Image (spheres, rainbow, N blue to C red):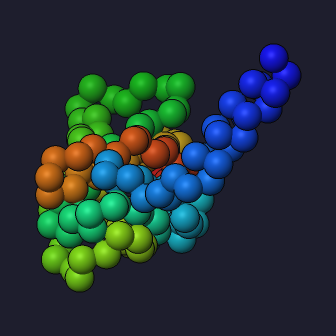
Amino acid sequence: MKLFFLVAAAVVLLSACGKDPFQTVPQIKIKSLSSTVVPLNSNLQINLGFTDKEGDISEGRLIYQPIRLNKRPLQADIPPYNIDSTTLPVFPKEIEGTMQVTLLYNNLHRSDLENDTINIKFVVYDKAGHKSDTVTTDKIVVLKN
């Protein structure tokens, strides 16, 4: 019986070692932020690492949404954040790489009464329509006017 478990464990271990690190579904991760504090009229740059087994992430879709974490609600005349989407540019067929996303201050700033504390969620779709997991930044503070 012990021999069976040893053989079974060895088979599982060996099959896990041979697993392809790239998947058909795109994988993304946040590699870096230009800053966790966004001063007045500054942009925020986020580097997202990606992998995609087929390399068809070029011309896919990047979807992102800032989420406001402040406890005080926005004034009624200030719109909430939108879910934004953009088509990824054409680039050589790559199965692994980094993309840089630049978000403008005016698209992140909401309140003139207090700093906005946010995080941002990202999802990527490749050209075949495969959806990545959602990744979320750490807290980011957007300074008020």
* Residue 7 image position (x, y, % from top left): 73, 34
Left or right side of 64 for 68: right
Say above or below: 69 vs 129: above
Q: Is residue 12 left or right of residue 72?
A: right
Q: Nearer the viewer, residue 14 or 133?
A: 14
x 15%, y 66%: residue: 59
- Give percent across and percent down for residue 88: 20, 66
> Which residue lies at the image location 85% right of the left edge and 22% below the top edge?
2
**Residue farthest to the right?**
2
Q: Is residue 87 visible?
A: yes
Write the residue at 21% across / 56% down: 126
Residue 93 place in picture, x, y as percent: 24, 77
Q: Is residue 129 above or below residue 34?
A: above
Q: Residue at x 34, y 29 (%)?
A: 75
Q: Quadrant of the N terminus?
A: top right
101 horizontally vs 55: left or right: right
Camera-side residue of 85 and 5: 5
Viewer-nearest residue: 86 or 81? 86
Q: Which image quarter is the C terminus in?
A: bottom left
Residue extending furthest bottom? 92
Percent x, y of residue 111: 41, 43
